[in-house]
Amino acid sequence: FYKLYPDAINHAATNGAYPIHTAILCVTKKRKSFSLLDSVDIVKFLLECDPNVKLQKVRGNSSLHYACRKRYNDSNIEAALEVLQTIYDAHPEAIEENRIESTIHRYHQQVRAFINSQLVYSRQAKDHHVMTTPDGNGRLPLHIALQNNVR
């Protein structure tokens, strides 16, 4: 289907969802002809086909937030975590979306653990970036602190 209609992955349905959101939703649906890991493979495929898929939103929510909000249980949480990791790897900046943090208490326990661990990593990376990025004069924050006798 993708070979015939490659742009179809960038068209939203009438409900505003793109194919990636439908694949995420399928993780929560148990079907005889469709395994949960098929949903994971479809999410990976869509992200590989077009890097802009990671930016597609439904009702103002990033794909990561959309995936976090789904109701998971013991039978589908492993596939859900793999989908979350795949989406996060493609678009780590989405973790900083305020909507994710403000609704984290509603997520499955393992989804909360994943999000919290990635938030910690994201903040450490951001702090590292701030500490290793020179200002307009080529000075690092450490140089400025030393020049100002900060202890």
Image: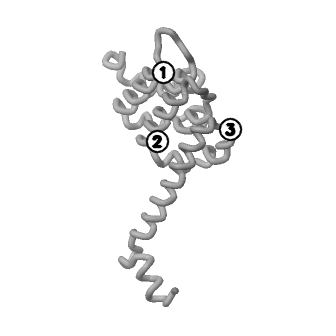
Question: Count the marks: how many?
Answer: 3
Q: Which residue is mark 2?
A: 88
Give the image location of residue 131, x and y in percent.
44, 70
- Hey, what amino acid is under mark 1? Leu
Of callouts 1 and 2, the N-terminal one? 1
Q: Which residue in the protein does label 1 denote?
A: 36
Residue 113, horizontal then vertical, whole percent = 57, 44
Q: Quadrant of the N terminus?
A: top left
C-alpha span from label 3 to label 2: 19 Å
Q: Nearer the viewer, residue 29 or 60?
A: 29
Q: Residue at x 55, y 45 (%)?
A: 115
SS at mark 1 in the image: helix
Task: Look at the numbered disc 3 and give the secondary structure of its residue.
Answer: helix
- Comes first in the chain, label 1 or label 3: 1
Where is 43 relative to 147, above or below? above
Residue 143 in the image: state x and y as whole percent.
41, 82
The residue singled out by tag 3 in the image is 106
What is the crowding at mark 2: few (fewer than 14 residues within 10 Å), some, or many (at least 20)? some
Contact flag, marks 1 and 2 (Cβ < 8 Å): no
Give the residue at x 44% y 77%. 141
Q: Mark 1 against mark 2, which lies toward the viewer? A: 1
Mark 3 closeness class: few <14, some 14–19, many ≥20 residues within 10 Å = some
